[in-house]
Image: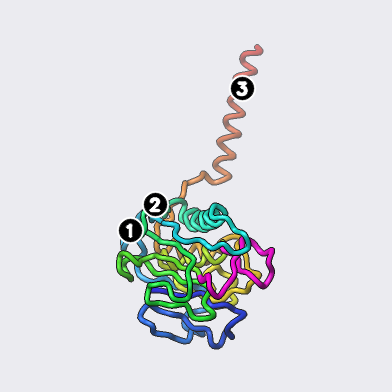
């Protein structure tokens, strides 16, 4: 399934649409509860909520505003790391040198018509396909950025004339790993609209909870502070007692 990120500056919220692979359009308003993020399917790992490594491939990159490929790749790596860190490394991403592989996200900046039978609408910044339990193996996860209708940058130095690659990449990778949209205006990374000044800082608790509902987010067990404090006090006490015995 392919959800598109709609430009806030191009479309009014009341007319914001979600695009699906089957060219079905639904009015997004009130389709989910405010403050929640929908999930679609069971993720790359299936119903077991186990760990999974997703491959990714960099295709054609943009040359907007003098951007270098290495800088664009780094922006996407930040986006991948954000989702991987949210799962405490249970969901990982590994680069591959081959396109059109199974369990792989192909990333490219493309024209409006770019060969996936899902041309960009004029207000669509980017789109991505859900994992392989929803889409066919080859197209599953693939991520396309609209390089014909929009200008791109990293950060927000160009003002309203360009969009931050990292911010859009985090959102679209969210779709690539099985997350849907939340209600616009909630401030989460999976909001369906964004202004040209939007940049990425961090995932919200809601974003983390959403990805953890698909992938097991195991964490290290750290002793409670009170227990740890008692242990340290006991250790210090033993050292002091031993020192006194030595001094005697």
Residue 105 in which image quadrant: bottom left
Residue 119 image position (x, y, % from top left) = 43, 77
Query: Which of the two labelled residues, at mark 3 and mark 2, occupies the earlier sequence position?
Result: 2
Residue 39 in which image quadrant: bottom left
At x 36%, y 58%, the residue is: 99
Q: Which mark is residue 96?
A: 2
Q: Which mark is residue 241?
A: 3
Residue 196 image position (x, y, % from top left) = 63, 72
Q: Is residue 237 left or right of residue 50?
A: right
At x 57%, y 30%, the residue is: 235
Viewer-closest of 87 and 244 = 87
Q: Is residue 161 magenta?
A: yes
At x 64%, y 61%, the residue is: 155
Classify 208 as above or below 3.
above
The residue that disc 1 covers is 101
Mark 3 secondary-structure assignment: helix
Mark 1 secondary-structure assignment: loop
Query: Which of the two labelled residues, at mark 2 and mark 1, occupies the earlier sequence position?
Result: 2
At x 38%, y 73%, the residue is: 116
Q: Is residue 68 magenta?
A: no
Q: What segment carries the magenta color?
A: 146-165
Residue 75 image position (x, y, % from top left) = 55, 57
Mark 2 secondary-structure assignment: loop
Q: Quadrant of the N terminus?
A: bottom left
Q: Is mark 2 in CB contact (under 8 Å) with mark 1? A: yes
- Label 1: few (<14), some (14–19) or many (≥20) C-alpha neighbours in 10 Å: some
- Label 2: few (<14), some (14–19) or many (≥20) C-alpha neighbours in 10 Å: some
What distance separates the C-alpha of mark 3 from that of mark 2? 59 Å
């Amino acid at each position: 399934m392919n959800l598109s990120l709609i430009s806030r500056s191009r479309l009014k919220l009341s007319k914001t649409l979600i695009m699906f692979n089957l060219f079905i359009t639904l009015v997004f308003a009130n389709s989910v509860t405010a403050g929640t993020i929908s999930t679609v399917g069971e993720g790359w790992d299936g119903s077991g909520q186990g760990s999974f490594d997703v491959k990714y491939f960099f295709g054609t990159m943009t040359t907007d505003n003098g951007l270098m490929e290495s800088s664009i790749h780094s922006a996407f790596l930040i986006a991948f790391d954000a989702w991987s860190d949210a799962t405490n490394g249970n969901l990982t991403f590994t680069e591959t040198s081959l396109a059109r592989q199974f369990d792989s996200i192909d990333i490219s900046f493309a024209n409006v018509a770019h060969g996936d039978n899902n041309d960009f609408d004029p207000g669509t910044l980017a789109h991505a396909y859900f994992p392989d339990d929803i889409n066919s193996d080859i197209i599953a996860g693939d991520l396309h950025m609209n390089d014909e209708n929009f200008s791109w940058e990293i950060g927000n130095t160009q003002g309203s004339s360009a969009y931050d690659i990292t911010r859009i990449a985090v959102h679209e990778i969210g779709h690539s790993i099985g997350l849907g949209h939340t209600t616009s205006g909630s401030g989460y990374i999976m909001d369906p609209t964004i202004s040209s000044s939007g940049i990425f800082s961090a995932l919200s608790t809601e974003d983390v909870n959403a990805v953890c509902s698909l992938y097991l987010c195991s964490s290290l067990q750290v002793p409670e502070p009170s227990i740890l404090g008692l242990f340290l006090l006991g250790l210090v006490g033993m050292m002091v007692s031993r020192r006194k015995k030595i001094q005697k």
